[in-house]
Amino acid sequence: MYGKPQEIIAVARNITARKKIELALEESEKRYRMIVENMNESIAVIDLNLQYVYQSPSEIHITVYTPEEIMKIPSEEQVTPETYVRGIQMLA
């Protein structure tokens, strides 16, 4: 009785639908990443504090800064004061 299993419990769940959704999302992300990383225009994603979350690789052709470099420059230093204030107001 001691040290020997008395019973085994197994739980199974069908996650087929979830896996299909995950695969579709992964494919969609790959497709959009390929588009963004190969376009000539610059795409930036910023958070509600106007801090960079993402900067596309094409930024180097526009500003001579790498995406990593441009993301380190505060956004208020990259635009006019009026544009910065307008951005803050739009996010409020």
Image (cartoon, rainbow, N blue to C red):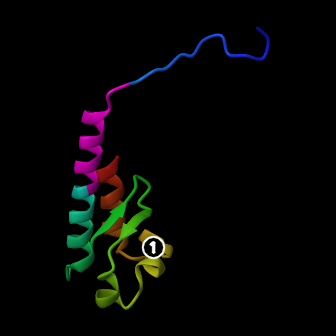
In this picture, is 57 found above or below 84? below
Q: For the magenta stretch, what is the residue range?
A: 13-26
Q: Name the residue under label 1.
A: 71
In this picture, is 87 found above or below 5? below
Q: Nearer the viewer, residue 14 or 62?
A: 14
Query: On the picture, is 66 further left or further right than 57?
Result: right
* Residue positioned 44% across, 62% down in the render: 51
Q: Give percent across and percent down for residue 35.
A: 20, 71
Residue furthest out toward the top: 1
In this picture, is 2 found above or below 59? above
Q: Give percent across and percent down for residue 66.
A: 42, 84
Query: Could you tell me how many numbered marks the image carries?
Result: 1
Query: On the picture, is 55 further left or further right than 37?
Result: right
Amino acid, disc 1: Met
Image quadrant in which you'd find residue 3:
top right
Dominant SS in magenta: helix
Image quadrant in which you'd find residue 61:
bottom left
Q: Nearer the viewer, residue 81 or 72?
A: 72
* Residue positioned 23% across, 79% down in the render: 38
Q: Nearer the viewer, residue 7 or 31?
A: 7
* Residue positioned 42% across, 70% down in the render: 75
In this picture, is 26 found above or below 83? above
SS for callout 1: helix
Query: On the picture, is 44 further left or further right than 5?
Result: left
Q: Give percent across and percent down for residue 23.
A: 27, 49
* Residue positioned 34% across, 63% down in the render: 45
